[in-house]
Amino acid sequence: MTYKIAVLAGDGIGPEIVAQARKVTDAIVQKFGHDFEYTEALVGAVAIDKVGNPYPDETHELCMNSDAVLFGAIGHPRFDNDPTAKVRPEQGLLAMRKKLGLYANLRPVTTFKSLIHKSPLKTELVDGADFMCIRELTGGIYFGRPQGRSEDGQTAYDTCVYSADEIERIVRLGFEYAGKRRKKLTIVDKANVLATSRLWREVSQRIEPEFPEIEVEYMFVDNAAMQLITWPKRFDVMVTENMFGDILTDEASVISGSMGMLPSASVGVHTSVFEPIHGSYPQAAGKNIANPCATVLSAAMMFEYAFALMKEGALIREAVDKSLEAGIVTEDIADGKKAYSTSEVGDWLANYIKNA
């Protein structure tokens, strides 16, 4: 069988880290006898520069006709530093999520023994932490309308909107994942202040009796932010709305010691997208110094979640673990020792897989 992969490298370090994920994927394909067909497409700032649209119709058509999407990163300082820009790279990411129906972002947070010392948290707090963040991806304040500014430009407004159906499908997914893990679900909201959060809690409480084997807790987002840092091992599966999930999962990245180690999968109605949680890191673009592991681990999730090829995903994870143990790492986690380039890490991972 031939698996069709849409490759959206994007901006900044995106092309460099995606190239390493492809090296690793090619090694897996060769070892296990699969057949992958890659097709590249534009997204983000590079797409704006070339066609004026951060998510061109041609890119969307490719994604719809692919079995999975391997995605790098988007963003560029010239847009970040220009609040008046009418077209922005991030609009492409939001459009992709909406058009592909990617309503759930799965972000596993785990620790690596050889990296625990890199976390700013105490070892006893993070050693053994292992939980899944499930972030709602197509609703909330990022998509709410109306949105804009007053005529005099001195007042701005955003609207947070959720329907009961949007909440139910993501909460049910949270219950299902909790059932596959340690059977504990934390539902994060701000129900003491926000009407949308009160609807989240109402819908969740209605669904809860259908899953009697799952231990459920409800937690305000400010408390969740504190608990992530003070007691991360208490979590198993966490489900929350779009903006809360965006913030909390970036906070959770310090548990592993580097944001460059955390993968994600965005799943939903159509083709699933596999991407690192970090941004485009434009300061490192073209320098061959960025950590490719989050993208490589996202490729592992692609094998597992899109194709149900569990052995293949497990071997990629093993390769990453062994590279950390051997010190074959980029400068962000080299800890004063020799730092390897992005491409050298990719080569080492691919060679490990070929010789495993």
Image: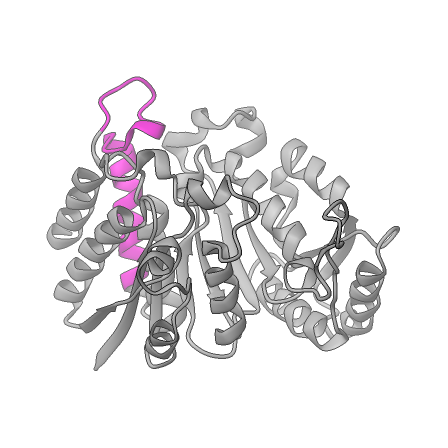
Residue 326 lies in the magenta-colored region: yes
Name which residue lies at 43% across and 42% down.
78
**Residue 272 location (% of width, % of height):** 43, 70
- Quadrant location of residue 33? bottom left
Q: Which residues are magenta?
A: 312-339
**Outermost residue, top direction?**
336
From the viewer's side, name the closer residue of 127 and 44: 44
User: In screen coordinates, is 211 left or right of 314?
Assistant: right
Q: Is residue 308 visible?
A: no
> Which residue occupies the foreground of this view, 291 or 58?
58
Q: Residue at x 52, y 43 (%)?
A: 82
> Which residue is at 47% across, 37% downward?
256
Q: Nearer the viewer, residue 123 or 280?
A: 280
- Residue at image x 51%, y 54%? 107
The secondary structure making up most of the magenta span is helix
164 lies above or below 343: below
* Horizontal side, residue 120 vs residue 194: left or right: left
**What is the residue that sits farthest to the right in this orientation?**
192
Camera sees residue 84: yes
Q: Looking at this view, is 56 or 304 the one in front?
A: 56
Q: Position of residue 145 (x, y in %)?
A: 71, 66
The quarter in which the N terminus is drawn is bottom left
Residue 237 placement, left or right of 215: left
Name the quadrant containing residue 180: bottom right
Q: Is residue 41 left or right of residue 352?
A: right
Q: Which image quarter: residue 146?
A: bottom right
In the rendered view, would you say 48 is above or below 355?
Answer: below
| Location of residue 43 in the rendering, given as x and y in whole percent from the top left corner | 37, 61
- In magenta segment, residue 276: no
